Amino acid sequence: MAEPQILSLPLDEELNAALQAAAVWRDMSVEDFALSAIREAARMDGELAAFVQQGIDSADRGDVYSQEEMEAWFEARYRSAAAE
């Protein structure tokens, strides 16, 4: 396994305080919380990139929806949510 890389970041007082508070709230060290947050952000970005690529691939195949179809879909979702 490769040697871990050290990352040094400048944090202003507000961000540092928020980081400290979040770590305490989760009962984690600041380092563990930061690593967890970075892992989660990287995972979410990877999922978003894959989702966007699916849309690009779909459009490239010609699988697209018209503006009217999208508006009808959103309207149906809105009405369904409002009914709940």
Image (cartoon, grey):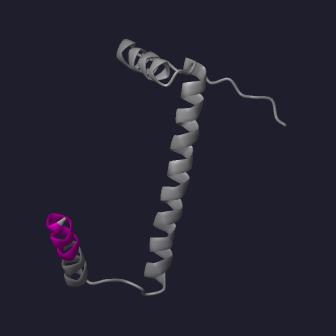
The C terminus: image quadrant? bottom left
Furthest toward the front, the residue is 84
- Looking at the image, residue 79 sits to the left or right of residue 53; the answer is left
Furthest toward the bottom, the residue is 62
Q: Position of residue 60 (x, y in %)?
A: 47, 81
Q: Is residue 8 visible?
A: no
**Nearer to the camera, 23 or 8:** 23
Q: Looking at the rendering, which quadrant does residue 36 occupy?
A: top right
Q: Is residue 44 magenta?
A: no
Q: Kindly identify the residue that appears in the image at 40 percent across and 14 percent down.
A: 17
Q: Position of residue 76 (x, y in %)?
A: 20, 76
Q: Kindly identify the residue that appears in the image at 80 percent across and 29 percent down.
A: 3
**Nearer to the camera, 73 or 5:** 73
Is residue 40 placed above or below 31 in the rendered structure?
Answer: below
- Looking at the image, residue 72 sits to the left or right of residue 47; the answer is left
Q: Position of residue 16 (x, y in %)?
A: 43, 16
Q: Is residue 75 visible?
A: yes
- Looking at the image, residue 35 sits to the left or right of residue 45; the answer is right
* Secondary structure predominantly adopted by residues drawn in magenta: helix
Q: Is residue 82 magenta?
A: yes
Q: Kindly identify the residue that appears in the image at 82 percent across and 35 percent down.
A: 2
Q: Kindly identify the residue that appears in the image at 23 percent across and 71 percent down.
A: 77
Number of numbered tags placed on the structure image: 0
Q: Which residues are magenta?
A: 75-83
Is residue 47 placed above or below 7 in the rendered structure?
Answer: below
